[in-house]
Amino acid sequence: MSIRIEKQGQAMIVRLDNPPVNAIGHAMRLGLRDVLDQLDGGVDRVVVTGAGSAFAAGADAREFDAPPAEPHLPDVIAALEQCPVPWIAAINGVALGGGAEIVLGCGYRIAAPGAQIGLPEVTLGVIPGAGGTQRLPRLVGMKAALDIIPQGKALKADEALAVGLIDQIADDPLQAALALDLAIVSDRPAVSAMPAPGRDDEAIAAARDAANRKMRMQTAPQRAIDLVALSAELPFDDAMQQERAAFLELRQLDQARALRHAFFAERGAKAPASLKDVAPVDVRSAIVVGGGTMGAGIAYALDRAGIAVTIVENDQGAVERAGVNIARLAEAAEKRGLMSAAQSAEVKQRIAVVEGYGALPAADLAIEAVFEEMAVKHAVFSALEKALPAHAVLATNTSYLDVNRIAAVLSAPSRLVGLHFFAPAHIMKLLEIVEGEATSDVALATGFALAKRLKKIPVLAGVCDGFIGNRILTRYREQADMLLLDGATPWEVDEAMAAFGYAMGPYETQDLSGLDIAYANRKRKAETRDPARRYIAIQDRMVEQGRLGRKTGVGWYRYPGGGGKVVDPLIEDLIREEAHFAKVARREFSAGEIRERLLAAMINEAAAILDEGIAAAAADIDLVTLHGYGFPRWRGGLMHYADTVGAGAIHERLQRYRKEDPVVWRISPLIERLAESGGRFADVKPAE
Ligand code: 3HC
Ligand code: NAI
C-alpha cells in the first residue's frame, strides 16, 4: 500500500512508506484515498509523515512514461484538503514535488529543523502537477513562489518558515502535530480558499530573466511562470485544470524524457555489480603528486572529504607554487561564503606540500597529476612504489597516456587505476575511472568508493587515447577546425553550438581553458599521426604566435582589457591563408549544417567507444558528456540525443559525409548495425 496507518488516541498517523525516499506512486495514492474513504467520527486529526528519513521525494518519476492512473494526485490532495478531519503535515525530512504539494494541502505544517521543502519539478522538465503552482503563491505570495517554482528550488526549514510555507519548526514534528491545539487549525481557510495573490509584474519579469539565463531553451520553467502568474487571474479550480493539462503535456515531451534519463542515469552511476563483494581500501590518507592546476584541485577536494593529504613536488619553487594554488582555492571558497576565514586558514595549514619522496607519510592512495609525459609518469610511479605501503592504490590523472604503459613500470601493475578528474577538479562532478589490463578489483572499487566520498559521478572507462570524454572531444574539435578551413568562421561555429544548447561553443571554450595543452598534445602525437587524415594547422600557428586564449588576452577572439570577447578579423585572415595553402575552395555553412556535422562526428566516435567496450553503456557516455563537457542536460546526453535523432538518420548523414572524406568519416560498425535493425544506443549491451 506504500503507507502505514496507526491510531494514537483520537489521532490517526499516516506514514508515507515507499523506501528509500517515499516516492508517491500509484499504490501510495490508492492508500491515501482509502484512508480518506475510511475516516470515521472517532478521529480528530490525521497526521501525515514519512517513514524513514524522507517525508516524500515527489511523484514517482518512473511512472511518467505510462498513462496516468486514478486516483490522480491533485484529486487526492483536494480530498484531503476538503476533509472535515484536519490533516497536519509532520515534515520529518525532504518534502519535494508531490511531497511538498501534499504538505500544501494540509491544514497545518510542522517541519523538523533538517527538513527541506521544495518544488524541483522543472529539473525533470515538468511543472508541479498537483496544485503547487496555485497553492504556493496563495500561501507565500507571487514573488516568493516565483523564486521557488521556476528554478526548482528547495527551502531549508528556517527559510520555509520565514516565507510562511510552514507554520512551525519542531525537533519532533510528529509529537508536535499530535500535541497541536486543533482550534488553531479549525480557524484557518484551506490554502486553495485563500485570496488569490496580487499579480507582480516585476517578479514575473525577474523570473523570466532568471529562467532565460539559467535554464535557457527549456520549456518547463517558462510554463511554470505562466501558471504561477495565472494564480492571480483565474479561480483556483480553473487554474488547476490548466496546471494538470500542462503537466501531462510536458511530461511526455523530449525535454522531460531527457531530464528524467539524466536523473536516473546519475543515480545508476555506481560500481559495477562485479565489484559488489570487493572491499575497497579504506582511504584515510592520500598523496597527490604535482600541485599544479589539477593536483591542487584534487588535493583540495580530498581534504574537504576528510582525507589527510600531502602534496609532493619536485623542487622548492614548485612547492611554493603548489602552496599558492591551495591558498587560492581556500580563499575563493571563503570569498564565496563556503567557509569561514578560520576554516580557510586550517585548509592551508592542513594540506602539506613536501619536496621529494624522502619523508612521505604512509598513505592509502596516491594520485599522480604531473606533466603529461610518459617518462615523468614512470619516474613518479617508481618512486611511489618504493615509498608507499603495499596496500596503497596508485592512480594516474593522465588525460591521454596509455594507462597500461604507465602501469608497466610497477612490479605490481594491478595497483594502478586511472582516476581522470576534470578541471576544476574540486568542482566538476565527473570522474572517469580507467581500468587498465592489470587493474585489480580492489583498485577499481577504491576508485568508486572515492568518487562517492567526493560526491562525484563515476564512469568506468577502458584504455584508449583520451578514454571516453577526451576521445569524443578530439573529434568534435577536429571537425570544427575542418569546418573553419572549409568556410565557416569560429563565431559561426560557436553560435551554432550555443543555439543547440551548449553554454558556449568550442572556440570560446578553448579560449577559456587555453590552447597550449592541446598544442602540446598534438606535438606529442605528431610522429604517430595518420598521414591519410586531414590535419588542420590553424591552432598550431595561433599558439606559435602567442594566441593562447584568455590568458594572453587573445585567442580565437580578442579580450580587450581582460573583458568580454570581441571578434578578431585577423583570425579570419589566418584561416583563409591556411585554406589557400591547403587548396580548399571555401563555402558557406548554415548553422544547421554546422551542428549536424559536429554532432555526427561526436556520435560516430561515441558509437565506436561503445562498440569497443571502452564505455559499458550509452548512459555512461551521456554522463560523461553532461558532466565533463557541457552537453545540454535537457537533451539527455550525447547518446540519448542520438537516439532521439535515430541511428538510421545518423547513418544516412554519415554516408553523405563519407563521400567527401572516407578517412575522417569512417562509419562506426555499431551505427551501421543499429541503422539496419532500427535499434537504439540505449539498448546496446556491454561487449562480452
Ligand atoms: N521518483 C522515482 N524514484 C525516485 C524519485 C522520484 N521522484 N526520487 C528519488 N528516487 C529514487 C532514486 O532513483 C534512487 O533509486 P535507486 O536507489 O534505485 O538508485 C533512490 O530513490 C534514492 O535516490 P537518491 O540516490 O537521489 O537519494 P538521495 O538521498 O541522494 O536524495 C532526494 C534524495 C533528494 C529525494 C533525491 O532523490 C531527489 O532529488 N529526488 C527527486 C525529487 C524530485 O524531483 N521530485 C519531483 C518529482 S515530479 C513530481 O513530484 C510531480 C508532481 O508535482 C505531481
Ligand atoms: P600543471 O602543469 O598545472 O601541473 C603539473 C605539476 O606537476 C606542476 O606543479 C609540476 O611542478 C609538477 N611536477 C612535474 N613533475 C613532477 C614530479 N616528477 N614530481 C612531482 N611533481 C611534479 O599540469 P595539470 O594541468 O595540472 O596536469 C597534470 C596532469 O593532469 C596531466 O597528466 C594532465 O594531462 C592531466 N589533466 C589535466 C587537466 C586539465 O584540464 N589541466 C584535466 C584532466 C587531467
Image: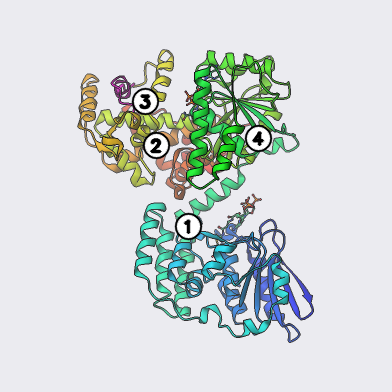
| Amino acid tagged 3 | Pro
Figure quadrant of residue 667: top left
Mark nearer the viewer, 3 or 4: 4
Reading the chain from its start, which is encountered first: label 2 or label 3?
Answer: 2
Find ligand 1 in the image and state its quadrant: bottom right
Mark 1 or mark 3, which is nearer the start of the sequence? 1
Q: Is residue 226 left or right of residue 625?
A: left
Residue annotated with mark 3: 662
Q: Label 4 vs label 1: CA separation?
A: 37 Å
Classify mark 2: helix, strand or loop. Answer: helix
- Checking the image for residue 208, the label placed there is none
Relative to residue 548, is residue 190 depicted above or below?
below
Q: Secondary structure at mark 4?
A: loop
Q: Mark 2, residues whose alpha carbon is within 10 Å: few (<14), some, or many (≥20)?
A: many
Which residue is more in the foreground, 226 or 178? Answer: 178
- Tag shown at residue 600: 2
The relative height of residue 574 versus residue 610 in the rendered view (above or below) is above
Give the residue at mark 1. 125
Q: Residues within 10 Å of mark 4 (few under 14, many from 20)?
A: some
Q: CA distance from mark 3 to mark 1?
A: 40 Å
Tell me which corner region of the image, top left, top right, bottom left or bottom right, holds residue 416: top right
Task: Say which quadrant the N terminus sits in.
Answer: bottom right
Q: Disc 1 residue type? A: Gly
| Magenta residues (range) | 535-548
Q: Are marks 4 and 1 in contact (CB under 8 Å)?
A: no
Query: How far apart in space, not on screen, are marks 2 and 3 (Cα)?
Result: 14 Å
Tell how many labels: 4
Q: Which mark is residue 307?
A: 4
Q: Amino acid at mark 4?
A: Ile
Label 3, label 4: how far apart the Cα atoms are: 51 Å
